[in-house]
Amino acid sequence: MQALWMLLASFFFATMGVCIKLASDHFNSFEIVFYRGLVGMGFLILLTRARGVSLRTRLPMMHFWRSLVGVIALTSWFYAIAALPLATAVTLNYMSSIWIAAFLLGGAVLMQKNQMPLRHQSPLFITVLIGFAGVALMLRPTFNPEQMTGALVGLFSGIFSAFAYLQVAALARAGEPESRTVFYFSIAAVVAGAFGMAFAGVNAWHWPSALWLLPIGLLAVFGQLCMTRAYSRGATMVVANLQYSGIVFAGFYSLTLFGDELPWIGWLGMGLIIFSGITATVLRARAIPNAPAEEH
């Protein structure tokens, strides 16, 4: 079931990216983050009351760190979506799976030291490098000097997304329900968005363009709930690699809705990224059978 939850989350996030792309012509990234969190908060208050789930937590600091890195990743991703073709921005954010592989594998090597020689890990390291090569191929057909900042911010979002997803897994192991985890993250999005708006300014609402803010919030919270449930019920590495389906969804949207051209070299890069994710899961399971990802 964790596979289905991650596939649903990827679909919701890719569809949210479409709405963000359309809304970014009228609102800055901080405004979108603010309204995304505000809609999420309202929905989750109703959801938790209906389910009888308390929003009180005994792990405030864990929620704080999860929300901090998550908001940084979210704001960076929204900026990248506005600055880059949708498929490129989504691909850079979904680099989080490769960062997760590197973090977890590096930690396992350091912890096991002589018990797990580094040469035994070389196939997985090569697989991770293949994933980076795929990203390079994805950027090459769409990247130009004017998009330098967007590309760097997109890579930045992937790194912090990896940190956020590991925090989600830790909260789930501590017994926090996914609705509570997403609720505190939504609060952080509202606070961070409001703070950013104080410096970046606020745009006037124009109808019907302002209507894109509602589905952004709803799709975000649906995707966040599905993603959180997937991480709470599956091994971190396995679930992380299933995120790559979001690249396929985003690529379809780019071609059909925005008319973005993706040459064969871009499709090759997309294939390499998906291949590296799947292969990394298999290789890691063979290389470190007694150290599941969720324990690091």
Image (cartoon, rainbow, N blue to C red):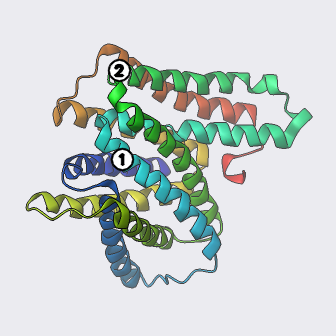
- Amino acid, disc 2: Trp
Query: In this figure, which residue is indicated by the disc labeled 2?
Result: 267
Task: Classify residue 38 as left or right of residue 151.
Answer: left
Q: Are marks 1 and 2 in contact (CB under 8 Å)?
A: no
Q: Is residue 202 left or right of residue 75?
A: left
Numbered disc 2: secondary structure: helix
Q: Residues within 10 Å of mark 1 (few under 14, many from 20)?
A: many
Measured as percent of width and height from the top left, residue 54 is found at 49, 84
Residue 289 visible within the image: no
Vertical arrangement, residue 24 with respect to residue 38, above or below: above
Identify whether 228 is placed above or below 62. above
Comes first in the chain, label 1 or label 2: 1
The CA distance from mark 1 to mark 2 is 24 Å
Q: Is residue 43 above or below residue 23?
A: below
Q: Secondary structure at mark 1?
A: helix
* Name of the residue lying farthest toward the top: 264
Give the residue drawn at x 33%, y 71%. 38
Left or right placement of residue 127 versus residue 51 in this view? right
* Residue on which the image places disc 1: 79
Q: Is residue 196 above or below residue 98?
A: below
Q: Amino acid at mark 1?
A: Tyr
Please name the residue shown 24% across and 34% down the image: 254
- Of the pair 90 and 172, the residue shown nearer to us: 90
Q: Residues within 10 Å of mark 2 (few under 14, many from 20)?
A: some
Residue 200 image point, x, y percent: 33, 59
Given residues 171 and 99, the one toward you in this image is 99
- Residue at the extreme left: 207
Left or right: 219 as drawn, with respect to 173: left
At 32% across and 43% down in the image, what residue appears? 81
Residue at image location 37% in from the left, 63% down from the top = 199
